[in-house]
Amino acid sequence: MIRILDIAFKDLLQLSRDFKTFMFLLIMPILFTFLFGYAFGGFGGNESDSRVPVGYISLDDNWVTDELHDLLDKSEVIRLDENIFRSTSDLEKLVADGELAAAIIVPDGYGRAVLKDKTIRLTVLADTGTQAWTTIEAEILTAASRVDGAVRTAAIMEQFELEGVPFDYAFDEMLAAWEEPPIAIKETSSLVIEEGGENNALAHTSPGMMLQFAIAGLLTAAQVIVTERKSRTLQRLLTTATRRIHIVLGHFLAIFLLIFTQFIILIIFGQFALQVNYLRLPSATLLVAFTAALCISAMGLLIGILARTEEQAITFSLVPMFVFSGLGGAWVPLEFTGKTFQTIGHISPVAWGMDGFENIVARGLGFESVLIPCAALAGYAIVFFILAVWRLNAAEEK
Amino acid sequence: MNNSAAIEVLGLKKSFGENHAVQGVSFNVNQGEIFSLLGPNGAGKTTTISMLSCLLRPNDGDANIMGHSISTDPMGVKSVLGVVPQDLALYEDLTARENLSFWGKMYGLRGSTLKTRVDEVLNVIGLRDRANERVGKYSGGMKRRVNIGVALLHKPKVIYMDEPTVGIDPQSRRNILDSVVLLKNEGMTVLYTTHYMEEAQELSDHIGIMDHGKLIAHGTHDELVKMVGQQTRIDLTLNGNADQVMAAWKETEGVSRVTSDEGLISVLVQDSNLTLPHLFEAATKHSARITSVNISEPNLEAVFLHLTGRALRD
Ligand SMILES: Nc1ncnc2c1ncn2[C@@H]1O[C@H](COP(=O)(O)OP(=O)(O)O)[C@@H](O)[C@H]1O
Ligand SMILES: [Mg+2]
């Protein structure tokens, strides 16, 4: 059993002699985190526009609705974030993920209802537990009330003139109109808007690049395994009283220790240099890092066993890196894509890793939220490991 | 098992598809002796060694190494074994010391024993001064020596060496051949393969000659040579009346044949030590001078030629 450790230590010694190891595992992810973070407006976003992003969809077509939009658009507090391609459910997701502080949905017939003095309310999606909410609520209420109030006053004045309605009736009417606030608030799950928009990009790219380059780093680890087989040192190992499974576990352990250490270093870097709040839930972060490292190292083991040459080890590492990272949302968050793509994306283990980390650092969810992603990662780890052992045995059946 | 047999090979067979690489090989190696498998490239030496190291499963037959069967007790076999593979099997990005240290652990050595043995082996292979250089930077001969050193770390009872001198300089070769004899003196049993008949002749207590997957003869060097029944040939050149001298030599005791070819006279004798003085006497009697002598003892080359109709070296 102790031979597993000996082999792992030997592998790590070999890996430490290869500069590529450090380049892929540490230098590149840090570099790319900055690069992507900058591209996604991760820096300086608060300087140009510090208003809170609030989604806006209008299902109504009426001049009253346009008035409301113009009022909101002039706000000093909120910034209307409009996209005609978004559906109500997209907004729900964006608010839930903390990409938007809140979202306003103007129901069909809103304008006419206001004009005809019927009760109709705006739908506002938000997490009411945040500090930002109080300000947003006040701002929307003000705008909606101004529109509503103006229309009603106008209508009542009109009635006065035309029909000579008694004043106390009109006053009652106006009071009644205020009994119900003109907006309906839909509570969404709690999230961390205080983190602010400027950190959201980094909260995404930091785990994204970490996962992506962990896979890239497999190429040196896989090369160690390929070289061992090609240089016939593996054969020689098998002439000693070392069991095959111990050799496999030794390599697996080495890659795991390498990737896990990479995660820890990059998590610490992310926490302190980039203010990505991994340590909000240290145990959850650790669990995601642990299972993701298990999964990626099992993948590395499989690559090392499948590749026949050192060149193949490089290809077999870089192709899954691109496919899994792209598919799994390490570059562009899966929330920005459609439902179908999100489902397909979760074929990639990277998607689960991203879910796990982002639930902690971007969505502000609790410990339970990482359990399913972690289970998926562990499942992938088992599948990869079994495939690796199976391929190894198949290769030796001669 | 035979009490004195360290290695007992019983009808091993191995085919790769239609290629019958080893076709029923049997032999015994006694404890503490050097046994050479001599044969040209492709004879099946490495395949045999691989089966005896439990790397390849034989199609048929079995072998016992220090009483452990290769088919039923591979771990037992591996625990008494040191293997020097034909191809260099080292981690080139690690130093010689790191390599030896790692392999020592794989052979079950730990702590101070490991450290002592690594130092001892570095001395034996003459690389103590350069122990902390990466193996990848070594010359071919130095790599070969590390390759051998690895198999000595745990002082195995039985050691296999598969063509350990291929492609190296004469000095490293000498160093290796000497160390093989040292191993034997320490009581190890050595199974050595080579296609150099000089090596087999110099080192071995017993020799097995392999060709096309078969062991075509085995025994001591003398037994094998006697099997061919060949005589020693003495080639000479003369200053003087060659015809008279040749006639006299034909009458000399122990000479069976005298022939000449463009001034070079060949004499076949039973024992050159006994007969050569008489050849000089006869030449002197006819006032001739012998200007050169070359003695060719019967050798394994001749044995191989006799058995297969082909030269050992192609
Ligand atoms: N792994 C293998 N697959 C197919 N053929 C092999 C394999 N190993 C050896 N052979 C064949 O078996 C024969 C014996 O090879 P080998 O044992 O290496 O000979 P030697 O060591 O005496 O040079 C050769 O014809 C070789 O081509
Ligand atoms: Mg060979």
Image: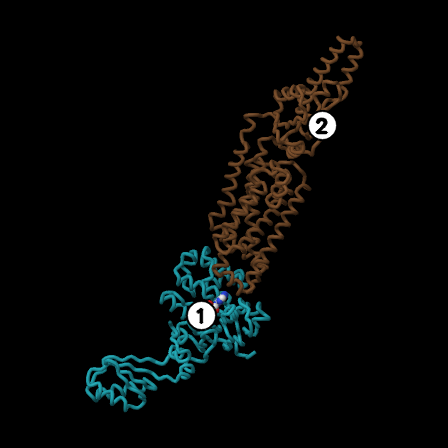
Which residue matches tag 2? A185
x then y, percent, for residue B251: 27, 91
User: The disc labelled 2 sits on which kind of residue?
Assistant: Ile
Q: Colour of chain A?
A: brown
Which residue matches tag 1? B42
- Residue in front for this viewpoint, A250 or B87: B87
Q: Residues within 10 Å of mark 2 (few under 14, many from 20)?
A: some
Q: In the figure, A366 relative to B307: above or below? A: above
Name the side, left or right, on which A363 lies relative to B156.
right
- Residue in front for this viewpoint, A216 or B82: A216
- The answer to whether the residue bearing label 1 lies less than 8 angstroms from the nearest atom of ligand 1 is yes
**Considering the image in quadrants, where does the N terminus of chain A appear?**
bottom right
Please say which color scheme the image uses.
by chain
Q: In the figure, A315 relative to B182: above or below? A: above
Q: Are the residues under badges 1 and 2 in a single subunit? A: no
Q: Residues within 10 Å of mark 1 (few under 14, many from 20)?
A: few
Q: Label 1: state its secondary structure.
A: loop
Quarter-of-image position of residue B86: bottom left
Q: Colour of chain B?
A: cyan
